Image (spheres, rainbow, N blue to C red):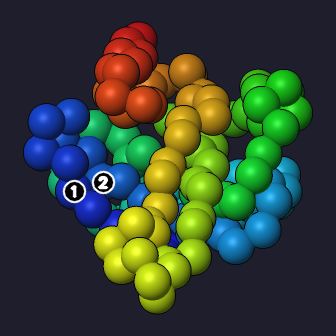
Amino acid sequence: MDLLFFNRVPRSLVVIELKKGSFKPAYLGQLAAYLRVLDDEERIEGKNSSVGIVLCKDADRAYVEYVLQDYTKPMGVATYKSRATERSSAGRGGDEETLVVINRNNCQQIFLNDNKEWSLKK
C-alpha cells in the first residue's frame, strides 16, 4: 500500500497503489486484498467501504474494464503522464493524471478527469 487517505465527503478510506510500469491484472488482486484488510480491521462502524485506485504509467481501457468485471470492491485504474523537468525551463515539468476506468460495483465516489466530475452512485 503506497498511499492511504481518509476522504471526508464519502467517509471512506482511499488506497492508492503507485506503479511505474504498465497495468497488470495482478495489481487489482493486490489492491482487493488491501481493501479487504482495511474494511475488516480498520474501518470504523458507520463509514463507507474503502476505495482503491491503481495509478500506473499506461493501461488499455478495454482490457482494464474487462478485468474489473469480476471485482465487487470499489476500485479504479488511472494513468499518469510524466514530463522530465528541464533545467532551462524550471517549473514546466510535473505529473498529469488521467482517469482510465472505475469499477462501478458498490462505488459512491466522485473522481476528476480533465477538470470534469464523474459521479458514480449505487
| CB-based contact (under 8 Å), mark 1 and mark 2 | yes
Q: Which residue is mark 1?
A: 6
Above or below, 48 relative to 116: below
Q: Toward the viewer: 28 or 91?
A: 91
The residue under label 1 is which amino acid type? Phe
Q: Which mark is residue 13?
A: 2
Q: Quadrant of residue 78?
A: top right
Farthest residue toward the front?
88
Q: Dot 2 surroundings within 10 Å: few (below 14), some, or many (20 or more)?
A: many
Query: Which badge, 1 or 2, is on the more N-terminal residue?
Result: 1
Q: Nearer the viewer, residue 35 or 40?
A: 35
Helix, strand or loop status at disc 1: strand
What is the secondary structure assignment of the residue under circle 2? strand
The mark found on residue 87 in the picture is none
In which quarter of the view is residue 62 placed?
A: top right
Residue 30 is left or right of residue 64, and the answer is left
Marks 1 and 2 sit apart, C-alpha to C-alpha, by 4 Å
Query: In the rendering, at what x and y percent does residue 57 appear?
Result: 70, 60
Q: Is residue 72 visible?
A: no
Q: Residue 33: percent from the left, percent from the top?
A: 62, 61
The residue nearer to you, when weighing 2 against 29, is: 2
- Residue type at tag 2: Leu
Q: Residue furthest left?
A: 8
Where 26 falls versus 89 (above or below)? above
| Extreme-bottom residue of the structure | 87
Where's residue 81, x and y in %?
A: 60, 56
Q: Horizontal placement of 7 versus 80: left or right?
A: left
Quadrant for the C terminus in the image: top left
Q: Residue at x 30, y 54 (%)?
A: 13
- Tell me the quarter of the picture where residue 49 sits: top left
Mark 1 nearby-residue class (10 Å; few <14, some 14–19, many ≥20): few
